[in-house]
Image (cartoon, grey):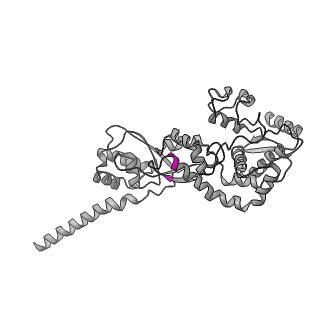
Amino acid sequence: MRGLVAGLAILIVAALASLGWLATIYPQGAAGGRGRELRVTLAPDTDLDELSERLHAAGAIEHPTLFTWYVRLLGGDERLREGEVLLTDDMTPRDVLQRIARGFGSATVRVVIPEGFHRFAIAARLDRWGVCDAADFIEATEDRELLDELGIPGPTAEGYLYPDTYRLSPDLGAEEIVRRFVANFHRRVGPLLDADQAALGELQETLSWGPHEVLSLASIVEKEAAAAEERPIIARVFINRLRDPSFHPKRLQADPTVSYGCLARPDDAPSCAGFEGSITRAMLSDPENAYNTYRHEGLPPGPICNPGIDSIRAVLEHEPNRYLYFVARGHGRHTFSETLEQHNAAVARWRNR
């Protein structure tokens, strides 16, 4: 009899230990991926066992049976959401539960902001992940009081929202997210600017530029250069256009600036009506677009995207050359020319091909 009681006690202790492990240790183990985005659709009356198998097949969880037990232990099977849910393959079981069921708190999500994303694309991604409303984020990037607090001289936080991977949760709020992005910018870009004081001094002397202007040109280089080795060359082409006394008018003539103007100030320029991403001849000719570098000399009012460190370095360490023109020749590469005649010949050559 004593042996039976002892055996039952051992079983009870083991069961309690297993439940404790399932409730506390298991939920903290990530699936082991690299942050790949996953989409899972939850229909009304979704079966938890079937859902766990789908999550496993998608790479969101490693052990579907354990996940089912874990969700049922916490009562999550009675609170499953409906509709499409976004996940990543490096979430913990707790994160996944918070995304697929109501009432378990806000899951911190891993949000990747690629180099060259402008604030509108960032806003859409944050909205899609449920971190904050897109309109709230855009409003925060234009809040003059917040910009002054963060020491941003431009009209928006564009350019200072450093592209990186962030862990974010919905309880942060749009303003705090902007603060985090900008703080990361200073942490990552500040040492580069400090180390290149000579380059900054040269740009200040020849073009009256400070760090903000460097960032504005870097954002254009980010959009124009596909090949990493061409970034310093393209940066110098734009600088040559502004410095060379023979180049008039001193217009950068960069297509991405035109597009950005239609995103940032669509009501200012008639040509931007109905803009969906494609540039038209009317847009290139429209002086009402303040960002149109085909009609306005010098830099646009501010950065047109959030460049990575390599594009910023390319402006500071631009490669010496006398090029004033370049044309795409395919596969992300360009042909560079010193004269308009050479440029026109290159354009004709690549058009014929």
Choose between 187 and 4: the one closer to the eye: 187
Boundaries of the magenta span: 167-176
Residue 229 appearing in the image: no
Residue 126 appearing in the image: yes
Choose between 8 and 130: the one closer to the eye: 130
Figure quadrant of the N terminus: bottom left
Figure quadrant of the C terminus: top right
Choose between 64 and 263: the one closer to the eye: 263
Return the x and y of residue 269 as percentages of the image width and height.
67, 28
The structure residue drawn at horizontal position 81% and vertical position 33%, both measured from the top left corner, is: 352
Q: Is residue 150 left or right of residue 255?
A: left
Image label count: 0
**Magenta highlight on residue 169:** yes
The structure residue drawn at horizontal position 67% and vertical position 61%, both measured from the top left corner, is: 191
Q: Classify 36 as above or below 253.
A: below
Return the x and y of residue 115 as percentages of the image width and height.
63, 49
Q: Classify 264 as above or below 56.
A: above
The structure residue drawn at horizontal position 66% and vertical position 37%, both measured from the top left corner, is: 260
The structure residue drawn at horizontal position 70% and vertical position 40%, both measured from the top left corner, is: 301
Q: Is residue 195 left or right of residue 129?
A: right
Return the x and y of residue 11 as percentages of the image width and height.
21, 66
**Magenta highlight on residue 269:** no
Q: Residue furthest bottom?
A: 2
The answer to which image quadrant residue 327 occupies is top right
Q: Is residue 277 left or right of residue 61?
A: right
Return the x and y of residue 258 as percentages of the image width and height.
70, 35
Q: Residue furthest left?
A: 1
